[in-house]
Image (tube, helix red, strand yellow):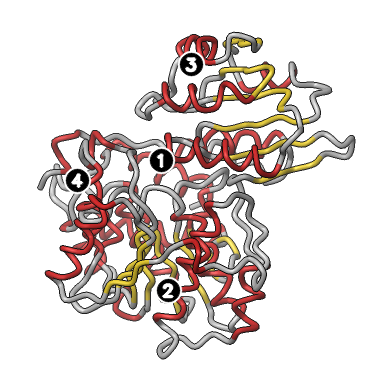
């Protein structure tokens, strides 16, 4: 089997959709020898900030000398980004090997119960991390938490970053319902660390923690001292994520000791592409890439732009959003910031129509030049000479922009592996 054939096999698993529940993942992991039993985890859920918090935790523990696994989604360009050891992507030959090892196990599932793409990738990651003898795995949920495939593990700590509206069609139409799904990663007696502030969602997390006798640590941004730590990730919201990561490390210090030097080095060296990432070209042009895909993310982006680019004109905003997101308020939040707005399709069958986006952007910023473009490429050409260009609305779009900027190796269509489907009724099991 070649790597391209392994990717094609994984691509075919998308057609089994997304099935919320843990039975398939438990069974597949058991057939694979329960690799999760040989690993230690920090399990991270939340609406926004999961990836950044995971990146911070991984960087801190790697700086402390621990061998780290990192499991995140979606990927920006290459599938291999999802599974990393000491921030090195899983090698192509290991992807091929793991697919070949799991294929006969998948044939043991009856028709109608075939594991999905995410379930298979979850077990692939567990097998790889166990084989690599990782000391600790930073383990990000895919969607929700309670019924997410990643929830078959018992972690050293559960982390919930925040609760905001996203994926309402699967997780619920109130913040409290969404919080209940995220709180599903809380395990009996296992500490849970959260930066959730809103009273309603926090009350849900407190109730679940109390029912499971899980110690609850609540974190606030004021607990992060910017004078004591250098944090390269832009945006005030990253201070709260950093406070969350530091509190988690403190909670686990007796199990996974980390020196003060490692704490400082880990945060100072953290890297998380596609989130308020600034790339400057040789001619001085700047591109800011951010995967703000919901209202909370758009508000954080707006605040970061005002803070870090005060007095600078945003010449062009390239905006592409998935139609199953709250794209109207995202447009209303971001459109007033730019002189020119290019609304583009996301490379996804779930893309919102650029014409619809353009209509909302025109209403939100009548003074701007707003154009619905047929592709990112056509919009890109029209930004030539612009000193500051913001690309946002979807991590899928950010991945495509990174490819254009030559910042990541081409993934030969691997970004399409991020596609998934689910029936809303399936989440309530």
Q: Secondary structure at mark 4?
A: helix
Q: Earlier in the sequence, mark 1 or mark 2?
A: 1
In front: label 4 or label 1: 4
What separation in Å lies between label 1 and label 2 (alpha carbons)? 35 Å
- Viewer-side residue, 280 vs 227: 227
What separation in Å lies between label 3 and label 2 (alpha carbons)? 40 Å
Q: Which residue is mark 2?
A: 248
Q: Secondary structure at mark 2?
A: helix
Q: Earlier in the sequence, mark 3 or mark 1?
A: 1
Where residue 357 is drawn, which disc sits there?
Answer: 3
Give the side of residue 152 with respect to residue 309, left or right.
left
Residue drawn at 12 percent across, 69 percent down:
211
Residue drawn at 57 percent across, 36 percent down:
302
Disc 4 + disc 3, Cβ < 8 Å: no
Q: Which residue is mark 4?
A: 177
Disc 1 + disc 2, Cβ < 8 Å: no
Residue 342 in the image: x percent, y percent? 62, 17
Q: Which residue is mark 1?
A: 11
Q: Earlier in the sequence, mark 4 or mark 1?
A: 1
Q: Is residue 311 above or below residue 54?
A: above
Residue occupying the far bottom of the picture = 254
Give the side of residue 100 with respect to residue 271, left or right.
left
- Viewer-side residue, 282 vs 87: 282
What separation in Å lies between label 4 and label 2 (alpha carbons)? 25 Å
Splitting the image into 4 quarters, where does residue 271 fall?
bottom right
């Amino acid at each position: 089997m070649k790597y391209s054939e392994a990717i094609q096999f994984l691509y075919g698993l998308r057609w089994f959709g997304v099935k919320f529940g843990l039975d398939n993942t438990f069974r597949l992991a058991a057939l694979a020898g329960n690799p999760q039993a040989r690993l230690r985890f920090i399990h991270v859920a939340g609406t926004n900030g999961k990836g950044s918090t995971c990146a911070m935790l991984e960087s801190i523990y790697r700086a402390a000398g621990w061998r780290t696994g990192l499991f995140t989604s979606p990927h920006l360009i290459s599938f291999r980004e999802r599974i990393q050891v000491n921030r090195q992507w899983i090698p192509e030959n290991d992807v091929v090997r793991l697919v070949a090892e799991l294929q006969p196990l998948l044939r043991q599932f009856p028709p109608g119960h075939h594991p999905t793409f995410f379930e298979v990738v979850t077990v692939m990651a567990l097998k790889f991390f166990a084989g690599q003898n990782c000391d600790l795995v930073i383990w990000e949920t895919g969607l929700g938490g309670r019924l997410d495939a990643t929830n078959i593990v018992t972690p050293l700590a559960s982390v919930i970053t925040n609760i905001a509206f996203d994926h309402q069609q699967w997780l619920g139409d109130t913040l409290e319902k969404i919080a209940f799904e995220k709180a599903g990663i809380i395990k009996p007696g296992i500490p849970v660390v959260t930066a959730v502030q809103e009273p309603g969602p926090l009350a849900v997390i407190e109730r679940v923690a109390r029912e499971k006798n899980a110690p609850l640590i609540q974190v606030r941004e004021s607990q992060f001292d910017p004078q004591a730590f250098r944090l390269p990730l832009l945006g005030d919201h990253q201070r709260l994520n950093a406070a969350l990561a530091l509190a988690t490390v403190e909670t686990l210090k007796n199990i996974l000791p980390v020196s003060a030097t490692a704490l400082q080095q880990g945060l100072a060296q953290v890297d998380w592409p596609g989130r308020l990432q600034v790339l400057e070209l040789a001619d001085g042009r700047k591109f800011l890439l951010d995967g703000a895909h919901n209202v909370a993310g758009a508000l954080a982006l707006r605040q970061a732009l005002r803070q870090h680019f005060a007095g600078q004109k945003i010449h062009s905003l390239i905006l592409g959003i998935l139609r199953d997101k709250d794209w109207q308020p995202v447009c209303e939040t971001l459109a007033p910031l730019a002189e020119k707005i290019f609304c583009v399709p996301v490379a996804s069958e779930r893309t919102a129509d650029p014409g619809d986006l353009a209509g909302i952007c025109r209403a939100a910023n009548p003074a701007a030049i707003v154009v619905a473009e047929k592709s990112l490429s056509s919009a890109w050409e029209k930004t030539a000479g612009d000193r500051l260009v913001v690309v946002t609305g979807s991590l899928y779009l950010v991945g495509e922009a990174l490819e254009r900027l030559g910042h990541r190796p081409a993934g030969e269509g691997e970004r399409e592996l991020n596609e998934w489907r689910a029936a809303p009724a399936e989440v309530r099991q």
